[in-house]
Amino acid sequence: MSSERRIEANRRNAARSTGPRTTKGKQRASGNAYKHGWSVNIRHIPDMSDKIEALAIAIAGYKAKPHHLQVAREVGEARFHLRRLQECKLSLLEVDDARLRTIGSIIADCTGEGDDTTQMSQDAVQYDPDIEAKLAAIGRYEQRAQSKLWRSMIKLQAAKDEDEEA
């Protein structure tokens, strides 16, 4: 009985969360990843294909079979993509931290406050909600990249297991 209710609830939820339905909405959503360049295939970034290839060889071995090397490339691509997103997130946090410190010191200079009150001035500065939205967006791409990395690692292990059985 509960299983039937669960299935029906899943159907209702799926009907509400299928993404954009209009052509205009689909076009707008399709451009989301392009806005920040996160959808660019990591291999098309200068110098990345050499790094990916070096990592793939390190993972699969110099004399690896072609299909092992291909799956190892997928692992490398996913790893570098995840790293790129993490670096982007870190740079956003560093920029915001530097902005808060600058604003705090300007407030301290203007008010004549000493070092003890600089922290209070920094706390009084409102947090930039834009940073939060950007971090949340990167977080979603980061989760996808992490999933892709795990899937490719499982695929690599499966390829190795197949060869050992054969």
Image: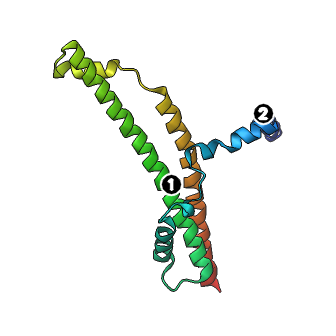
Q: Residue at x 56, y 64 (%)?
A: 43
Quick one: SS at disc 2? helix
Instruction: Judge from the rendering whether residue 90 lies leftward or rightward of residue 158; answer left or right.
Output: left
Between 116 and 111, the one nearer to me in the picture: 111
Instruction: Judge from the rendering whether residue 90 lies leftward or rightward of residue 68; answer left or right.
Output: left
Residue 67 makes an appearance in the image: yes
Distance of mark 1 from mark 2, alpha carbons?
Answer: 30 Å
For the image, the number of numbered tags is 2
**Residue 37 at x, y percent in the picture:** 56, 49
Vertical position of residue 88 compared to residue 118: above or below? below
Q: Quadrant of the C terminus?
A: bottom right
Q: Residue at x 59, y 71 (%)?
A: 71
* Extreme residue toward the front, this view: 46
Q: Residue at x 56, y 53 (%)?
A: 145
By what rule are the colours in the image chosen?
Answer: rainbow
Instruction: Judge from the rendering whether residue 3 lies leftward or rightward of residue 146; answer left or right.
Output: right
Q: In this figure, which residue is indicated by the disc labeled 2?
A: 16
State the mark number for residue 82: 1
- The amino acid at mark 2 is Arg
Quick one: SS at disc 1? helix
Q: Quadrant of the N terminus?
A: top right
- The amino acid at mark 1 is Leu
Q: Residue at x 18, y 20 (%)?
A: 116
The quadrant in which residue 127 appears is top left
Crowding at mark 1 (Cα within 10 Å: few <14, some 14-19, many 20+): many
Instruction: Judge from the rendering whether residue 62 lies leftward or rightward of residue 158; answer left or right.
Output: left
**Residue 88 at x, y percent in the picture:** 45, 46
Crowding at mark 2 (Cα within 10 Å: few <14, some 14-19, many 20+): few
Mark 1 or mark 2, whichever is nearer to me: 1
**Residue 77 at x, y percent in the picture:** 54, 63
